Amino acid sequence: MAFNYKTTAFSASGLAQEAMKKPSPYTSYAIAFVLVAAAMTALVFFVIYPNEFRLQSMVTSRCGSRPSSSSLSSFMEPVTPEPDFRLLIGILSLPDSYERRHLVRDVYALQPDVANARIDVRFVFCNLTKEEQRVLVAMEIMLYDDIIILDCAENMDNGKTYTYFSSLPKMLDGGSGGGRPYDYVMKADDDAYFRLQLLAESLRKLPREDVYYGLITPCLNWRARDHYMSGMGYILSWDLVEWIATAETPRKHQVGPEDKVLGSWLREARRGKNEINMEPVMYDYLEGEPRTCYRHELVPDTVGVHRLKDNWRWATALKYFNATVGLKPSNLYHMS
């Protein structure tokens, strides 16, 4: 039996050697298919993930341990570059101001994307008080997800701005992986139009700390001790927002013209030392009133224009800045 086993083994070995000398056509096709598939897979990864197509990203340690599943997952996903800065624009509104929100929402949606910056536009108001508001505002949130509802009674100069700034750190806690959710926060009126590209360029190289940005008032005497940034739209760096949320001075002094009151907080605490005055590219719309240093004609390099109180003023400003230049011709409508 032993002899027969060896003979059988020898015969099988001989057959294997013969098979290796003369491979089957099917074997050749299978090998070619595998090689082509591997090459196509590598080409796809190289085209889609050029920055991640590096051998070293698969090496986890000097001792050659096996890559974890999270390492492989990060290798597969494209890397999103960090923006130069993050800006939250909070537009103070009223629950019933549906038409104005619709207009302002369109105005910002039609502006081109700003490169290397994250700019979020949100509408801010206090508690809802009517049943129709709870339905209609809920529909807005479902459609656009761009509304912040503060826990306060609706008001203009009785603490709404304080509630807005002081609520944000807790509302946005953890929104950026434990870091700052935004570098800057803006409070804006709903009758102000800001051109995001120029606004972004004016912010890009600014400090990220102790920044107080806007149109200084009074502009004729901006060195006056009691100056402040106009309520049309001003920006605070995130450290000042965090300070407002915890400091005694803002909490105890909320009543009065909101822009002037906020300026007094910073002045008393000796904060906001990086003041950025954007006059003359931030200003009030001029119509039927005397021209001043803060109210004048529309200008090409406008960052923000204020007091667009009605649709005619909005239309005039938007036409001046070519907001509808991208309208495509169609047989379905005409503008004549």
Image (tube, rainbow, N blue to C red):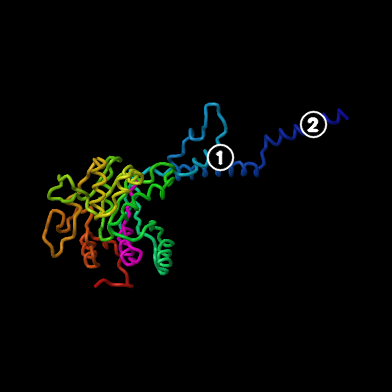
- Asked if residue 116 shows in the view, the reply is no
Residue nearer the viewer, 90 or 281 = 90
Magenta region: 86-109
Q: Magenta stretch containing residue 95, yes or no?
A: yes
In what element is the residue under mark 1? helix
Residue 14: image location, x then y, percent: 75, 32
**Tag 1 residue:** 69
Q: Amino acid at mark 1?
A: Ser
Q: Magenta stretch containing residue 28, yes or no?
A: no
For the C terminus, the quadrant is bottom left
Earlier residue among tags 2 and 1? 2
Q: Amino acid at mark 2?
A: Ala
How many neighbours does mark 1 have within 10 angstroms: few (below 14), some (14-19), or many (20 or more)?
Answer: few
For the N terminus, the quadrant is top right
Q: Of tags 2 and 1, which is closer to the observer?
A: 1
Residue positioned 17% across, 44% down in the render = 225
**Tag 2 residue:** 9
